[in-house]
Image: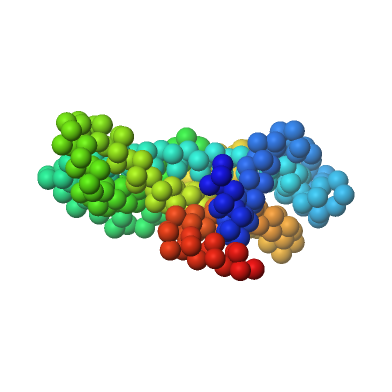
Amino acid sequence: MKALREFLRHSGPGRWGLALAGTLVMLAVLAPWISPADPAAQHLALRLAAPNAAHWMGTDELGRDILTRVLFGARVSLFVGFSVVMGAGLAGLGIGALAGYCGGWFDRLVNVILINAFLSFPGILLAIAFAAFLGPGIGKVILSLIITGWAGYARLARAQVLQAKEMEYVLAARSLGASPARILLRHLLPNILPPVLVQATIAMAGAILAESTLSFLGVGVLAPTPSWGAMLNDARSHLFDAPHMVLFPALAVMAAVLAFNLLGDALRDWLDPRMRSYLIITSLAR
């Protein structure tokens, strides 16, 4: 907690990013209790209503309350983001750490063939291809994004392990008879987690954006489950007669991506000793 207080006290972008991300998470968790309506309830008599006292963000082409659907869409986007980051992060961390520590043919197989093969294609195109092959649905979206996202974590973990395994504490543990599994789990992994944490925070924004893209293209979350991308897709034909249908889901996507990008950039600067000293000095000089 002391480290977190120091980080928030000296990092302005970190404060803003954490506050915005925390607000989004809180709204998503409390959506069933604070939303003014049922996200799937249709009221055709109120279709395409502009923002008013009863519907703060207006209604869509089926008369559904946009504020409610934005709140429930936050639940979907954050759930997909956290699931993808956890799944891809754990898979990439395990594969990359093993490749970097074992070396030899296994390292060449993972690095030269698997990682390079996945990173040679644009991630979003691979995700669209896998999502189209697997079919729509929130579980299949998560699986598609995990399959296309693990390689970045694996390359980072491999590079960190290659550097850390030659350090003195690893050599000392090996000379004392520690097993490879113990060295990996007790000595290497705790010391390579900070850069992986930074990448995971920034990747959270990418996962939210990817889920919105897949849902916008119709290969993501199935209707009538609210999704920011699907809401933007529904709003395409009403861009001029009901611009609020585009505005509020787009602002929600922007806020989520901005929050995690700010937080990731702030963590990256804070975990760099030189940048941390600079941030502390500039903060104290104000």
Q: Where the C terminus falls, by quadrant?
A: bottom right
- On the question of residue 233 being in view, the answer is no
Q: Is residue 183 above or below residue 59?
A: above
Q: Where the N terminus falls, by quadrant?
A: top right
Q: Nearer the viewer, residue 63 or 68?
A: 68
Q: Residue at x 42, y 52 (%)?
A: 199
Q: Nearer the viewer, residue 21 or 211?
A: 21
Q: Position of residue 231 (x, y in %)?
A: 63, 49
Q: Residue at x 31, y 34 (%)?
A: 186
Q: Is residue 184 above or below residue 273?
A: above
Count of picture labels: 0
**Drawn side of residue 178 relative to residue 254, left or right:** left
Q: Position of residue 30 (x, y in %)?
A: 70, 36
Q: Residue at x 36, y 58 (%)?
A: 122
Please, which colouring scheme is shown? rainbow
Find the residue positioned furthest to the right: 53
Q: Position of residue 142 (x, y in %)?
A: 45, 39
- On the question of residue 44 being in view, the answer is yes
Q: Position of residue 258 (x, y in %)?
A: 58, 58
Q: Residue at x 83, y 44 (%)?
A: 45
Q: Quadrant of residue 99?
A: top left
Q: Nearer the viewer, residue 175 or 119?
A: 175
